Amino acid sequence: MRCGAPGPRRIIPCFPSADPCAGPYTVGHRVLTLRRCKTIPLYARLVRYGFRKHATYVWGAIAGAFTNSVFGILRAYILIALWQARPGLAGYDVADAVTFCFVTQAFIGPMQLFGGGLSLPERIRSGDIALDLVRPASLQLWTLAEDLGRAAYLFLVRGVPPMLVGAVVFGITVPAGPGQWSAFLAGFAVAVVVSFGWRYLVALSTCWLLDDRGVAVVSMLLTTFFSGMMVPLHLFPGWFGDLVMAMPWAAMVQLPTDLYLGRAPVLETLAFQSLWAAILLGLGALGTMAIRRKVVIQGG
């Protein structure tokens, strides 16, 4: 891409990187740089855009909340039967097991535990990703900001109702005080970022695989069974239990749920979640650089 093309009052971007603060702009023959503070409102607006975009499909979110509530009730009765047969299993009592059930049901929409939530695979297949890569903003941060808005909306509309149903039908437990609530909300926020980091890598794989359906199915299976969505990961014995608790999927569901129940050390849990968030986002940044080169080589 040529930088500094002639023309009166013509503004042509020159992007040495995806960061608009790092790339100069030319106005005529003068080089201007964007100040970093100008990018902050951009990503804040993208969060708002993601929230409003998904608020358009309110009936779809309500239907999802109804489905999650129904399956939550079914799961709860199964867990009640299991815990009555094996009291104290995994260190939970019956009330904790039922609470675990409805909290994890509330995570399905915000975390996109069954995959999806990102439009990158379709844009990669159509070639529209080339336009995304020349935007004056980071593709990864742009996508993350929109996904945060989506997660916030789905948590309110699709996540809270199952927990209310569980409270009415079974009487689930709630955090003991503001400190426990703050720990849970912080863990939930980091878990959304971890979920995004994983789904972003799965979406980027389309650039090499051309079809993301196979890897999406594998991702769904891994996330479903190793996040704590089905049963608490504390049920897995020995070295296998230690292994699954050290994987990134545990940071999406099991750990924020333990923070809700007050059964996890706050600082160590948040540090572990933040570590996986940083690792996945770092891998995503490297993947974004790789597809930038691939798109250019393919003539995109």
Image: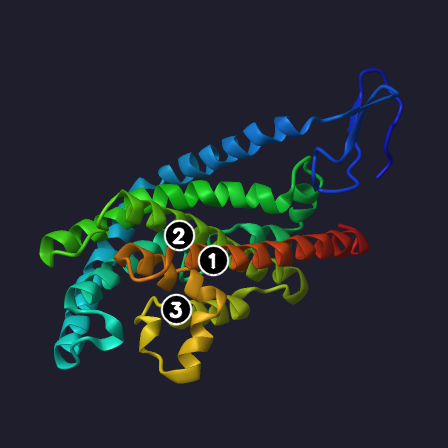
Residue 50 x %, y %? 46, 39
What's the residue at 29%, 55% (across, down)? Answer: 260
Mark positioned earlier in the residue sequence (2 or 1): 2
Quadrant of the snapshot with the N terminus: top right
Please tell me in which quadrant of the rendered image residue 80 appears: bottom left
Residue 53 lies, in percent from the top left, at: 43, 37
Alpha carbon separation for disc pair 2 and 1: 7 Å
Circles 2 and 1 in contact, beta carbons < 8 Å: yes
Q: Position of residue 39 (x, y in %)?
A: 62, 31
Question: Which residue is identified by label 3?
Answer: 224
Q: Few, some or many C-alpha atoms within 10 Å of disc 3 (few <14, some 14-19, many ≥20)? A: some
On residue 187, the disc is 2
Colour scheme: rainbow
Which residue is labeled 1 in the image? 273
- 8 up-or-down from 259: above or below: above
- Which residue lies most toward the top here? 8
Q: What's the distance in space between the residues labelled 3 and 2, CA to CA?
A: 19 Å
Q: Is residue 180 left or right of residue 140?
A: left
